[in-house]
Image (spheres, rainbow, N blue to C red):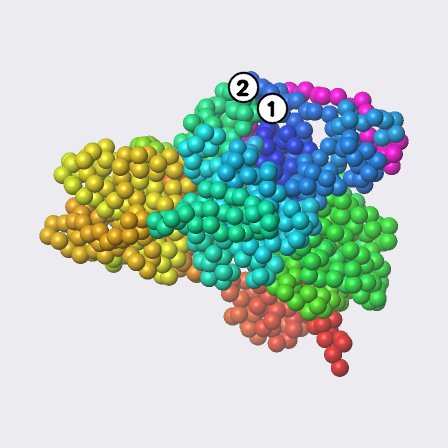
Amino acid sequence: MEAPKRSQTSNSVLIVGGGMAGIRSALDLAEAGRDVVLMDKAYSIGGLMTSLDRTFPTNNCDLCTLSPHLSESGRDLRIELMPLSRLDDVQGEAGEFKATVTSEPRYIDLAKCTACGECYRAFPEAVRFTPGLDHRAPTCMRYPQATPYAFSIDMERCDNIDELVRICPASAILPEDTRKTRTLDVGSIILAPGADLFNPRVLDTYQYGVLPDVVTSLDYERILSASGPTKGELLRPSNGKSPKKIAWIQCVGSRGVQKGLVSYCSSACCMYALKEAMVTRERFGGEVETTIFYMDMRTAGKDYETYLERARNEYGVRLVRSRPHTVEMEPSTGELVLSYFTYDGKVALTERFDMVVLTVGFRIGAELTEMASRLGIELNQHNFAQTGTFNPVATSRPGIYVSGLFESPKDIPATVVQASAAACCAAADLSPLRVVSRKEEELLPERDVEGEEPRIGVFVCDCGFNIGSVVNVAEIAQSMSRLPQVEVSEVVGHGCSRESIEHIQKTIRDRKLNRVVMGACSPRTHETLFQDMLRKAGINKYLLEIANLRDQDAWVHSDRPRDASAKADELMRMAVATVRHARPLTDYHLAMNKDVLVVGGGVAGMSASLSLADMGYRVFLVERSGKLGGVARNVHRTLRGEDVQAGIDALIDRTEHHDRIQVLKNAMIVDHSGMAGMFKTGIQVAPQMFYREIKHGITILATGALPNRPKEYLLGRHKAVVTQLDLDGLLARDPEAARGWNDVVMIQCVGSRVPENPNCSRVCCQAAVKNALRIRELNPDACIYVLYRDMRTAGFDEDYFRKAREQGIIFTPYDLDAKPEVEPSGDAVSVTFTDPILRRRFRLDADCLALSTGFIADEESTEDLGAIFKLPRTPDGYFLEEHVKLRPVDLPIPGFFVAGTAHAPKTIRESIAQGQAVAGRAQTLLARDVINLGAAVAQVDGTKCAACLICVRACPFGVPFINEKGYSEIDPSKCHGCGVCASECPAKAIQLMQFEDDQIMAKLEGLLERIS
């Protein structure tokens, strides 16, 4: 790798905002060897996500999802946390900024505070905290695992400061604490301050704040949360009784034109209303009736449409397309009376409910607009940061980047993608790193436990409703305490919190434990955290066993708590039996190859290639066709009027002339081997189809998707029928054609949201609005009809949808069971459809019928590459990411990343952001000189090996070979730890470390020991 020459000297990035976006950017930069200052105006980091109960589309617990990352950001020595802080001023330019930050006094020594609560109990009026639904909630923590895990004191409300100081057992009260101002030298800045939620008190028709059973969506999340005011019990705020009928009203404060409302769509609201309704039905049984009143269901993300169908068909969530206008209370019963109009032209209807949830969206408050003004950042008409399609995270001021809600309303996956993209761009403004020196904590010497009798510590997490609401954790802990060699067995609440981790570490040291069993969440998300905990306590990190009480028990048996507790007991017994045979192991390390292979030369692939090449890494860009640009070469303008072709041409020119990028066109992948840091990929290049092997450390898949051309509505059989992509090109090449049209019809969701292609293609609605507005511009007299199922113009695209309606473009909904009918009619086509408002059938002859057909996965490409790289795909053919929320561009195999429409349908802007995001994620590995292979590798006992060649034939990766001594040998640097060889060896000469035979047998014995 060659680092580009720059004059900058700063290696630090300032991140404003400690929510999901800020945390993800901070972790990416810290892993890449950059120093980060992470500041937030609140007392602790985590942002809005820490107030939620579950996340869609998996309905996982948010705290369980987020807490490992909060712990990471809290313990990473390259990240400095600055809570209670604001950014006052920024001087200088990219690479050499001077940022002035003011921090308010906390009156608490963070290094000493243990969050014991003594100060709150003695002086509750003086302890500052962010209240939930109930302002009397007895905690000053924003959530159970607050980071920093410490209180904050309001000294002005304390009437006895001396007593407050005296009562703190940790001597953590600092009565003389003062406001502090610092000037930070940073190379770049990332703005991720989030956004506010709309306060519906201004809408007197819904009576929020007047009727206690009318709550916002965030209020409802707090009710559902185990850390909320009702401890997760679903109770009406008015009387504490369980509701039987709950209504959700969508678009409260959004998509409106009245004073105090905003015109844009907040993007995430439909999905989280569906999630709340589904979780309600799941947790509290079918006796709770859930109804969502909506205008358009905007479920346009990856697998979101299937989530909508699950809500409707599996959970029985009732969906009513309507416009609710009033909520009143019936005094005699206390019921809420909701009045609404439906879209089928019916008169006003009313229904009675026990609770009404107002689904509120996002907006930018005055504090953020003032900050943007101080920093010289341009905002759009809605006060969000102004960015462009080809620079989706760059603000108007060079060196300052934006991610998350401050850029535009969005959901968590899009936020995380932007956060990694912003980290990538921010790193490019810093001084180059030739060798990353990692800051690490001083670790206790690893205790030698060889020869010691097992001394096992068992720690059982309750995790609120995730485990403790189903499993009797106290009973499990007591049962484990009776097992041989178990020295400690106890319940630890949220085991991944800082407080619990420190308690477990202290217990390990004080009780001289040499084995640990965690009854907790999935090892997939928490194993690294708990291994790190053991190592810092002074014992080998592999002396750990995790019983997955969440995913494998509480979640899947939530309706059978007695059986779930019995199963938890068995899982824990298996873990205890296994950990007795655990051995200290050593990780294997390998030198990191810092070259990168990018497969696919569309906008995502080129963006990733350029971002990495600009950092000094060598990139091999493999494109199957003879041209770069992908599908975007056929798009001429965006909905906002930006010139796509000019942007694409600039990307292609930079890519083809960059001295760190080698472009291989007309090339195809034919084989692959190795692992992260030492991949080998074979390609063949046309026309001679020469074979070439590329050695690289990272693989990025950006192979794109295909424009769909379903055999519907005479497409391909009549010249008047085109796709929206065809129409975009026609309007660019021959605008005169549109001036001769009298009637134009557009049909949405053609070939999408159907069984053979179940998800939404995301781009179709905005393409229809864009082309309709363009036709109206060229031909003001044309009659334009858009027939739709749901208009999904999320975010600021809603403004163009409204503009189209204002210009007389007619939008008419249709149902899947009453689709439009199309027949040829000379040079035109006859389109018949039903208007639900007028309740009449219409027939008209269209000079142009434009079908919104969207994308389908490139099955041939993803299937072949999936087989070669051994990567999983979704049922509809797209590559499956590691984690839908927190790892949206990481693939399950380390060292692989995905970007663009190979991941799911998305816009050009989103594809470019993902291209930058994968570069940001890749740099976390590329910054290392060595890669940790772990300890789970196969080892051969040469005294038992008969050189029968069974392992050589069985290994799917071709790793084992017969060495010069005549027995099988397995190179740890090539072993994938799959265990196939160990299971096939007839002589039992091969053991897979961490999964040795005695451990597996002990696990079975632990399960079966009580069966007579």
Tell me the amino acid under the disc marked 1. Answer: Leu
Mark 2, secondary structure of its residue:
helix
The residue range painted magenta reads 165-191
**Would residue 158 be found to the left or right of residue 497 on screen?**
right
Residue 172 part of the magenta-drawn span: yes
Residue 276: which disc?
none
Residue 741 part of the magenta-drawn span: no
**Would residue 344 be found to the left or right of residue 538 on screen?**
left
Query: Mark 1 or mark 2, which has the lower sequence index?
Result: 1
Whether label 1 touches label 2, CB < 8 Å: yes
Identify the residue at the far left of this view.
Answer: 826
**Hey, which quadrant is residue 766 in on the image?**
top left
* Residue at mark 1: 87
Residue at point 85%, 32% (across, down)? 171
Quadrant placement of the C terminus: bottom right
* Residue at mark 2: 374
